[in-house]
Image: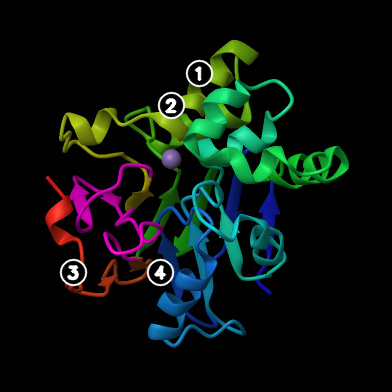
Amino acid sequence: MLETIEVSRVKRFAANTAGRDFAVGDIHGHFTRLQAALDAVGFDPAADRLFSVGDLVDRGPECEDVIKWLNKPWFHPVRGNHDDYVCRFDTCDIGNWMYNGGVWFVGLPLTEQQNYQVIFQELPIAIEVETAQGLIGIVHADCPFPSWGQLRDELESPESNKRLKQVQNSCMWSRRRFEHQETQGVEGVRALVVGHTTIRSPATLGNVIHIDTAGWMPDRGYFTLLNLKTLETIPTARPALSQDWDWD
Ligand SMILES: [Mn+2]
């Protein structure tokens, strides 16, 4: 596979000269539905790569399949706020996590929980992918700075643990940009790809592309795949869904 340079919180990928690169929104334990979306674009595991905005687990029925997916050499997720619960399972507010879909984890044997924790702690907060047209940034929820370079610096060389925690939490939790419909975008990247905020169809604010079209909500959503070279989304139009009326 292509060479990667791994640092603790930001993972860089060289351009994919062999195949296509896609990004997908929040998965939440729906890997069968994700595979169907990949099949629909003729995803080639020998050449193509799939980047994920994280939230791999909670809520859906196939959370434990995540280990199988993390072992696929072409699957590259960042850490979402739900993945971060796994990283902090022994110190987080378990009641709050269970309320938000963490029930699958709570009943696992302690050694298995610890195994998940070790694996999930390797998930980077940010990914950057080179394309012929420029660098693509990926975080779960938001880049809390006007430039990608500043985010990279803050994650790689934080001035304090407190500051790092704030920055990471913004990357994983913030809905500020979408709620305020901010269009100034992020300097230093061709595009920033995010999930976390569930939307009816993909939305672009400046150069920030929101792709969580709720593939993890049966009947209400679908998986959008974003081609990182062309920035085209697939499917190109929202498919007919049985509970379309359920959206605001
Ligand atoms: Mn999320």
Secondary structure under the numbered disc 4 in the rendered image: loop
Which residue is at a point 45% across and 36% down the rendered structure image?
Answer: 149
In the structure shown, which secondary structural element does the residue marked by tag 3 occupy? loop
Instruction: Using the numbered discs, state the Cα–Cα distance from disc 1 to disc 3 in whole angstroms.
Output: 35 Å
Q: Mark 3: which amino acid?
A: Arg
Q: Earlier in the sequence, mark 4 or mark 2?
A: 4
Q: Are marks 2 and 1 in contact (CB under 8 Å)?
A: yes
Q: Is residue 63 above or below residue 133?
A: above
Q: Is 195 within the magenta? A: no
Name the amino acid, label 2: Ser
Circle 1 SS class: helix
Residue bounds of the magenta highlight: 196-222
Disc 2 marks which residue? Answer: 170
- The mark that comes first in sequence, 1 or 3, is 1
Residue 163 visible: yes
Q: What's the CA distance linking mark 2 and mark 3?
A: 29 Å
Query: Nearer the observer, disc 1 or disc 3?
Result: 3
Q: Position of residue 28 (x, y in %)?
A: 49, 53
Sequence-wise first label, 4 or 1: 4
Q: Is mark 4 within 8 Å of ligand 1?
A: no
Q: Name the residue tied to disc 4.
A: 132
Q: Is residue 120 above or below residue 44?
A: above
The crowding category of the residue bearing disc 1, from other C-alpha atoms within 10 Å (few below 14, some 14 to 19, many at least 20), is few
Q: Which residue is mark 3?
A: 238
Q: Which mark is residue 166?
A: 1
Give 17 or 141, whichever is nearer the viewer.
Answer: 141
Residue at 28% x, 52% y: name it.
209
| Secondary structure mainly formed by the magenta segment | loop
